[in-house]
Amino acid sequence: MHFVKINRIRELLVPHYGKSFVEKCKYLWKLGWNTNPVMTTCVVTLPLVMLGTLWIYNFHDSNPKVRKYRKHITIYRSDDPRVEKIRHYSIIDN
């Protein structure tokens, strides 16, 4: 079992010049998996876990049907012309 040095990646990819990016990635994945499977798994899973955490933190809305309560509140003056365009709707008022 030998470990591939970073500067040897270029030499290893020379036979794969002209092939698609996906084929090069598959080749590097197989090479990494054969030399050090634990490190290869960590290199792939760590960014996926980080992106998943970022998605849950930023983009996953806990209750998307309730649009009344937003993260950013805009306050208008009473003499602002945009006030006329605001629609008021509430289930409580009905």
Image (cartoon, rainbow, N blue to C red):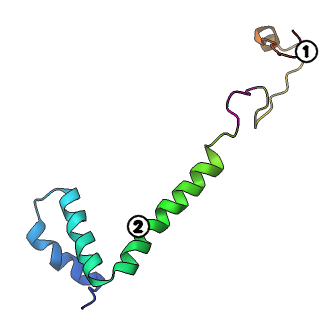
Q: Is residue 46 above or below residue 11?
A: above
Where does the magenta region start and end? 63-67
**65 in magenta:** yes
Three-letter amino acid code of the residue under disc 2: Val
- Which residue lies under the disc numbered 1? 78
Residue 79 percent across, percent down from the top left:
89, 12
The kind of residue tagged 1 is Ser
Image: 47 above or below 40? above
Q: Does the CB distance between marks 2 and 1 fall below 8 Å?
A: no
Q: What residue is rendered at 23% in x and 64% in y?
A: 26
Q: Nearer the viewer, residue 58 or 39?
A: 39
Q: Residue at x 49, y 68 (%)?
A: 46
Kindly report which numbered mark, 2 or 1, lies closer to the viewer in this rendering: 2
Read off the residue under disc 2. Answer: 44
**Distance between the alpha carbons at the discs numbered 2 and 1:** 54 Å
| Residue positioned 80% across, 28% down in the render | 74
- Predominant secondary structure, magenta span: loop
User: Which residue is painted at 23% across and 78% down in the image?
Assistant: 9
Q: Quadrant of the C terminus?
A: top right
